[in-house]
Amino acid sequence: MMSWLPENVSTYGAEIDRLFYFVYYLTGVTFFGVQIALLAFLWMYRARPGRRAVYTHGNTTLEIAWTAIPSVILAGLALAGRTTWADIKSRQPATDFVIEITAKQFNWEVRYPGLDGKLGTEDDVLMDNDFHVPVNKPVRVHLKSRDVIHSFFIPVMRLKQDAVPGRDIPVWFEATKAGKYEVPCAELCGFGHSGMKGYIFVDTPGDYATWAREKKVGPAGVTG
Amino acid sequence: MSQAVGHAPAHHGAHAHDEPGFIRKYVFSTDHKMIGKQFLAVGLAMLAIGGVLALLVRWQLAWPETPVPGFGWVPEPTMYEGIIPPETYNAFFTMHATIMIFFAIMPILVGCFGNFLIPLMIGTRDMAFPLLNMLSFWTMVPASILMLASFFVEGGPASSGWTSYPPLASVAAYSGVTTGQNLWVISLIVVGASSLMGSVNYITTVINMRAPGMTWFRLPLTIWALFITAILLLLSLPVLTAALGMLLFDRMFGTHFFAPGAGGEPLLWQHLFWFFGHPEVYVLILPAMGIASEILPVFARKPIFGYRAMAFSIIGIAFLSWIVWGHHMFQSGMHPALGMSFTLTTMVIGVPSAIKTFNWLGTLWGGSIHFTTPMLYAIGFVSMFVIGGLSGIYMASTPVDIFIHDTYYIVAHIHYVVFGGSALGAFAGIYYWYPKMYGRMMNETLGKIHFWGTIIFMNGVFFPMHILGTGGHMRRIYNPLQYDSLQSMQPINVFITQSALLLGLVQLVFVFNFLWSMFAGKPAPKNPWEANTLEWEAPTPPPHGNFPGPVPTVYRGPYEYSSPLVQEDFLPQARRLEPHVTSGGH
């Protein structure tokens, strides 16, 4: 199953994948254990003439064991993800590369600071759907929505965040590999939901500089 | 408060009633058994409609924008010479889920089995409130009609997902759906009322009307499950109803509960909906778990392993189900700290389900297993539920959920628990209690064909969805070919659809068996499965009042199979043994 996971090109994506694999092995072992035991019992204890079933109501030791062990494993799994979760959703690393993406039916409106380096001023640069970021640099995106709930999804970065009208939700990522990657909407947003997607271009510093110059996009700055 | 004369439970057996006319017997019946069968009939019909909607969705996913064979007659703008446009596609998956959850699974598992079984299995003559019971069915009918009528109004039916998130669902301009979404809301308010009436009845009946000797820990686990389910519905439905009311008011009367521009909050809907929605999914699975716990001991000829653990784990699941709802909202924009608390409770709710699985295995261990059709379905339930439960662990982990939320990984999980769990459990129950309900045996060969076809093809449909989800395939999209990253997975979509078509086809075997056996099946004896519980003490089918003569007295627990006290490998709850032989069980 895991061979179908798309490549990962973000820093925290690797942590997510680690957890994903951990759950995969854990559930895989459990799956085979339980299903094989089931099939074995069905075969071994099929009705045969002259054989009466074992008359037992249970076993307290087993009950305690199969209550305690899953509890420890599952609680442990919940705690195992806490640092990654906090890293991604709560602690936004300081960065000077900040853009704003407003979702709407049915495209992403991307806003960059203009040459004054400040977002929210006259010279901001607007573009639809396709946008560029430099590789190996933390990027912060302020997610908004004009109408309904959308969801900003970059599969290769393991990034997903709902864009909610009336809110400004910051997300961050740091890309580790240059390339062109799809950015689909992942929350049903109407009849045009399917096909609502943009492309994020992760550029080498040189390529990014060229693009930024051409677009008159300023040094990334904070909201003006 | 008192019921009509002649229905007071304590006096039934001795009365000779005038035989009721056709309308009183088959249409406006207050007999719990007839009401149960009425719920089954409507539930099965809606199951078929929900299934066809799923096949339409699957057609579009496998062969996007090609005409669906046999649907050329559907007029524009719903379809274009058989081709499904995006607006209609959204309506199809919305209505598929809505119909399956509220109008198929709940009527069958809760409406049919709850009604038919509770009085019989606890040893009483009817429900506490027979008239209220009749009303609960006859409220579901107009709700169903409203839901189906929404297909035919201008703008089409609801198309914002069964989860109906505002503002898409609260502002008509965003979806293009006007009357259809309003009908959807009203229909669900009405169907909620139906369930509430049923819950009041079930809870009161189980608490107050158990036969002499039927203590709480001698109740069949099916009754435990249905009783706890009724409590979940009683407490959760009012929250859904309130949310639906707010949604309707936003849509029709200019309020702004969910409109951010005017001070409202879209996430309020999600909290309210899922506060209901999570207990709701346990409403969908608990009766099926009860049925599996009922059937496995019968055909393994062994007591259920860990009866008290099984009863307490039902209570544990129900209790925990109130504090996990946020796991549907990890990526919603709610405060990330809530993600931590909800992930912990969500992982922990896996524990009682694990306990149940191990106890089911323990029930099979050392048994003398007879592979009848109900037993095959009960075993299939355990196996498929394990897959559904394990896949849930991925999404319980908040970081992993970032990736798999709103992908087909979720769709795989929900269908393993709701088809592999609830639906297989429903089939198990139908095959098992059909003889008591209709007085005839279903055909075993056809039953086995239905089972093997269903379990093989359902895995062909839903297992590959884990792969799609892992590959990042979003849910609720109309055309996967619009995405570069999904192209390579399209053959999987085709395979899934082919399996789905075969899955649909094999259900015809069940339809035929169900209907044909009613008239031409072998007449069923009183206790064809040699089971212990009280419904098998009643004649087949049971008359009005259930037990000719006095209600049975209960001497032991429900799962005394292969007891050393008797030579037969079963020992009914109501069988009195000679005084020098002490009764086993609880």
Image (tube, rainbow, N blue to C red):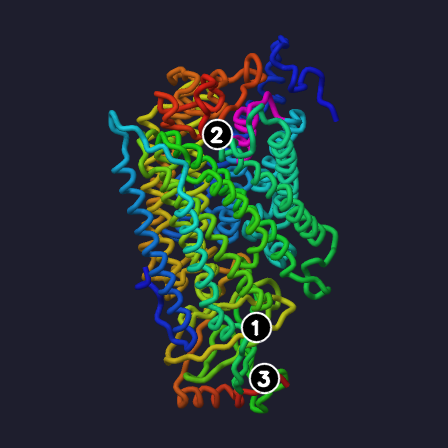
- The numbered mark, 3 or 1, whose residue comes first in the sequence reads 3
Q: Which residue is mark 3?
A: A124
Dots 1, 2 in contact, CB < 8 A: no
Compared with B375, B170 (above or below) is below
At numbered mark 1, what does the secondary structure look like: helix, strand or loop? strand
Q: Is residue A212 left or right of residue B128?
A: left
- Of badges 2 and 3, nearer the viewer stands 2
Q: Position of residue B259 (x, y in %)?
A: 68, 61
Pointer 2 chain: B
Residue B75 visible within the image: no
State the CA–CA distance, disc 1 to disc 2.
59 Å
Q: Nearer the viewer, residue A161 or B330?
A: B330
Pointer 1 chain: A
- At 38% across and 21% down in the image, what residue appears? B566
Residue type, label 1: Leu
Q: Position of residue B229 (x, y in %)?
A: 56, 40
Residue A141 visible within the image: yes
Residue interval drawn in magenta = B110-127
Compared with B245, A175 (above or below) is below
Q: Which residue is mark 1?
A: A143
Pointer 3 chain: A
